[in-house]
Amino acid sequence: MKERLIFALDVETFDEAQSWVERLQGEVGLFKVGKQLFTRCGPQVVEMVRAAGGEVFLDLKYHDIPNTVAKAAVEATRLGVRMFNVHALGGFSMMRTMAEEVEALCDAEGLARPILLAVTILTSSTEEDLRRVGIERPVAEMVPLLASLAQQAGLDGVVASAQEMTLVRQACGRDFLVVTPGVRPATAALDDQQRVMTPGAAIAAGADYLVVGRPIARAQDPVAAARAIVAEMAAQD
Ligand code: C5P
């Protein structure tokens, strides 16, 4: 079950990232590297996690013309990340071209094909935010629409809140992966997350992977916190 727990490396420096990897490698399945850490430290941070025996979820949410996203995806694949994501709002051709080029690269160079994920609608977007960019449909329609578009384009899953999981499952079936942030053990602080689910409830609701940051990072004993989350996940599976 710990293979399905992703720790968010939401830190500023390479050294902080490295000390978290040293502490948590073996306790979690993957480390999520996002825009802040990647922009500051670059591919070396991915290489550091891999050298320590860890796997990486590269959370850069690519969104650009199809060729540019495909080339970035090829480089992410060469870096050896286990999963990465793109914005489904980039469109079908962007996702399709990206998936095809990654597939072709893996065949040609004998590389492991990463898990390809889409972000549907950012959970920070309100319906008012969406209307202001011309999206009139409710989030509850946009999320399954974009998830099925990603599936048709050959992607493997989406990042979705626990609340959106049922919509995604209805639209895409059980084999399409759902990676869920906004997870909080019953005793942990909510921080800035609004709609949260406990690790056990998220697994019971059908999440394939959980992304957890502060409930582990800010715990008095982070290793114990990670183990407690894994135990709660296992009890629900
Ligand atoms: O510390 P916490 O557990 O809230 O961290 C959750 C991680 O998941 C952060 O890196 C955050 O950016 C990311 N995330 C999220 N909600 C989304 C998508 C990603 O919290 N909808």
Image (cartoon, rainbow, N blue to C red):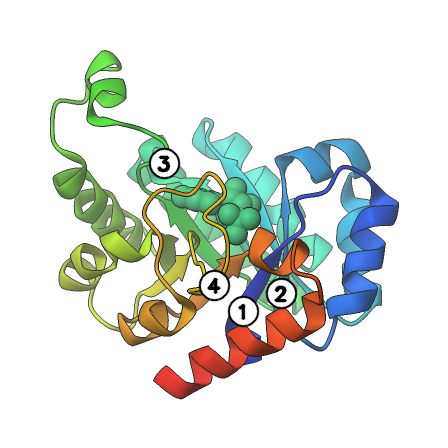
C-alpha distance separating marks 3 and 4:
26 Å
Query: Label 2 neighbourhood size at 10 Å, few (<14), some (14-19), many (20+)?
Result: many
- Closer mark to the observer between disc 3 and disc 4: 4
Q: Amino acid at mark 4?
A: Thr
Q: Real-space Cα distance between discs 2 and 1?
A: 7 Å
Q: Residues within 10 Å of mark 3 (few under 14, many from 20)?
A: few
What residue lies at 35% left-to-right and 42% top-to-bottom?
Answer: 194
Q: Which mark is residue 30?
A: 2
Q: Earlier in the sequence, mark 1 or mark 4?
A: 1
| Left or right: residue 158 compared with residue 101 | left
Which of marks 1 and 2 precedes in the sequence? 1
Quarter occupied by residue 36: top right
Disc number placed over residue 5 in the picture, else none: 1
**Comes first in the chain, label 3 or label 4:** 3
Mark 3 and mark 1 lie on one chain; the one further toward the N terminus is 1
Q: Is residue 3 left or right of residue 120?
A: right
Residue 122 — which label? 3
* Helix, strand or loop for disc 1: strand
Decide: is 28 above or below 231: above
Provide the residue designation for mark 4: 187
Q: Residues within 10 Å of mark 4 (few under 14, many from 20)?
A: few
Which residue is more in the foreground, 36 or 232?
Answer: 232
Q: Is mark 3 within 8 Å of ligand 1?
A: yes
Viewer-side label of 2, 4: 4
The disc, 2 or 4, on the residue closer to the chain's N-terminal end is 2
> What is the secondary structure assignment of the residue under circle 2?
strand
88 and 18: which is toward the camera: 18
* Type of the residue with mark 2: Leu
Q: Residues within 10 Å of mark 1 (few under 14, many from 20)?
A: many
Q: Give the residue displayed 69% in from the left and 54% down from the top.
A: 78
Asked whether the beta carbons under mark 2 and mark 1 sit within 8 Å of each other, the answer is yes
